Image (cartoon, grey):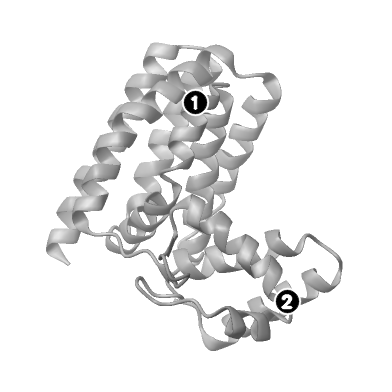
C-alpha cells in the first residue's frame, strides 16, 4: 500500500501534469486506474465525481470520460442510476479469467512470433529489461506494470485486432488478478523473469509453436501458484 506521503506526492504530480496541458482524461484515467489496481480505491467502493474533481483540481467532464474508459477496461461498474463502483472480483472470476487467458494469450504469442516487426521486438525487449531491473525494494506497482507491459506488447505484436480486442476486455479483472498474485507470491518475479525470457527468445527465433507452448505453460503455472498461495493466505 502507498504511504500518506506517496499518495500526496502522486496527487501533486498528476495535478502538475494536468496544469502542463497534457490530456486531462488520460491523466485522470491513469491516476484512477492506479488507485484501483493498487486498491487505494477499494473493491466495491463508490466513486464520487465531486470528490475526485476537488482532489485533482479538474472539472467533471474529463472525470466522466475517464470513468467511461475504466468501465470499458472492466475496472468500474456503472449502474442504471449512474452510480459508479470499483469492481469486486471473486475467486470464481479469477478462474473464468484463467480459462480465457490460457486459450487466447498463447495464440497471441504464436502470431507474434510469426508477424512481429523489428520495432515490436525491441519494444518487447525493453519491457523485459525493465522487469530485470526491478529489485526487492521496488513496489508491487512497478512489478505489476512491467508484467502488464510485457504481455500487452506481445498481444499487440500478434497484429490480430480481434485477439487484441478480446484480451483488452479482460484487462480489468486481469489487473486485480496480477496485483493479488504479487501479494501472495513473493518469489513470483524470479519465476516470471525466467518464463518471460524463454517466451521472448521463442518470438525472436520466430518459433511460433514454442512461443505458444511457453505462454500456455506460463499462464498455467501462474494460476496454479496463485490458487495454492491464496488458499494458504
Up-down relation of residue 131 to residue 142 (above or below): above
**Which residue sits at x=67%, y=86%?**
54
**Which residue sits at x=37%, y=58%?**
176
Secondary-structure class at tag 2:
loop
Secondary-structure class at tag 1:
helix
Residue 73 on image: x %, y %: 49, 51
**Which residue sits at x=55%, y=39%?**
128
Residue 114 on image: x %, y %: 53, 12
Mark 2 surroundings within 10 Å by alpha-carbon count, few (fewer than 14), some (14 through 19), many (20 or more): some
Residue 35 on image: x %, y %: 51, 70
Mark 1 surroundings within 10 Å by alpha-carbon count, few (fewer than 14), some (14 through 19), many (20 or more): few
Q: Which residue is mark 2?
A: 59
Q: Which residue is mark 1?
A: 162
The residue lying toward the viewer, choosing from 48 and 7, is: 48
Image quarter in which the N terminus is found: bottom left
**Which residue sits at x=66%, y=79%?**
11
Left or right: residue 213 compared with residue 86: left
Amino acid at each position: 500500500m502507498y504511504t500518506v506521503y506517496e499518495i500526496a506526492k502522486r496527487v501533486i504530480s498528476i495535478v502538475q501534469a494536468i496544469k502542463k496541458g497534457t490530456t486531462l482524461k488520460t491523466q485522470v484515467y491513469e491516476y484512477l486506474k492506479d488507485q484501483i489496481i493498487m486498491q487505494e480505491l477499494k473493491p466495491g467502493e463508490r466513486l464520487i465525481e465531486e470528490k475526485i474533481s476537488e482532489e485533482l483540481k479538474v472539472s467533471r467532464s474529463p472525470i466522466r470520460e475517464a470513468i467511461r474508459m475504466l468501465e470499458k477496461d472492466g475496472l468500474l461498474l456503472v449502474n442504471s442510476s449512474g452510480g459508479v463502483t470499483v469492481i469486486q472480483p471473486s475467486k470464481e472470476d479469477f478462474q473464468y479469467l484463467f480459462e480465457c487467458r490460457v486459450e487466447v494469450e498463447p495464440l497471441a504469442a504464436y502470431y507474434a512470433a510469426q508477424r512481429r516487426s523489428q520495432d515490436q521486438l525491441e519494444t518487447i525487449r525493453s519491457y523485459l529489461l525493465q522487469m530485470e531491473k526491478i529489485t526487492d525494494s521496488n513496489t508491487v506497482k512497478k512489478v505489476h506494470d512491467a508484467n502488464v507491459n510485457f504481455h500487452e506488447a506481445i498481444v499487440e505484436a500478434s497484429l490480430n485486432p480481434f485477439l487484441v480486442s478480446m484480451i483488452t476486455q479482460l484487462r480489468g479483472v486481469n489487473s486485480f488478478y496480477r496485483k493479488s498474485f504479487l501479494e501472495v507470491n513473493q518469489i513470483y518475479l524470479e519465476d516470471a523473469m525466467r518464463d518471460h525470457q524463454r517466451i521472448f527468445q521463442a518470438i525472436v527465433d520466430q518459433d511460433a509453436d514454442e512461443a505458444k507452448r511457453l505462454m500456455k505453460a506460463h499462464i498455467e503455472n501462474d494460476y496454479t501458484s496463485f490458487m495454492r498461495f491464496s488458499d494458504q493466505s
